[in-house]
Amino acid sequence: MTPELQARIQNLVDSNKILVFMKGSKLMPQCGFSNNAVQILNSLGAPYETVDVLSDPDIRQGIKEFSNWPTIPQIYINGEFVGGSDVLIELYQQGELQQLVEVAIAS
């Protein structure tokens, strides 16, 4: 990954309290896993932004290296990598995601 791409991704993560790198957008997810992430965050009423990796091949590959996580979507809360769709579902079911979101919004 180029230093420029790393800086670009870092800036996106730092500029958004809750950010989802996904296939598609929050209005039109392009895969089931991305849709799961959007539905969970919507159910919490969380304000969040998305980055469509399908429209940017550099980001699509670079985010996997950035996080050392092989799949999309990838969710960042307060600058920290949380995980993918499966991790988000698990945190949601355990009630931990609500806490992470509330702390992020309050900070």
Image (cartoon, grey):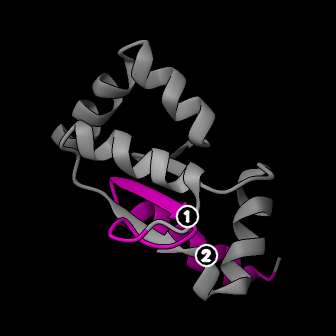
Density class for disc 1 (Cα within 10 Å; few <14, some 14-19, many ≥20) is: many
Q: Position of residue 39 (x, y in %)?
A: 35, 46
What span is in magenta? Answer: 2-28
Q: Position of residue 78 (x, y in %)?
A: 39, 46
Q: Say which residue label 1 marks.
A: 22
- In this rendering, the answer to whether 106 lies above or below 60 is above
Let me know if residue 7 is in the magenta part.
Answer: yes
Nearer to me, 104 or 86: 86
Q: Say which residue label 2 marks.
A: 53
Density class for disc 2 (Cα within 10 Å; few <14, some 14-19, many ≥20) is: many
Nearer to me, 61 or 2: 61
State whether residue 63 appears in this view: yes
Badge 1 amino acid:
Met
Q: Secondary structure at mark 1?
A: strand
Q: Quadrant of the N terminus?
A: bottom right
Nearer to me, 96 or 107: 96
Let me know if residue 41 is in the magenta part.
Answer: no
Q: Position of residue 54 (x, y in %)?
A: 63, 80
Badge 2 amino acid:
Val
Q: Are marks 1 and 2 in contact (CB under 8 Å)?
A: yes
Q: Which residue is located at x 78 percent, y 73 percent?
A: 61
Q: Is residue 70 left or right of residue 101?
A: right
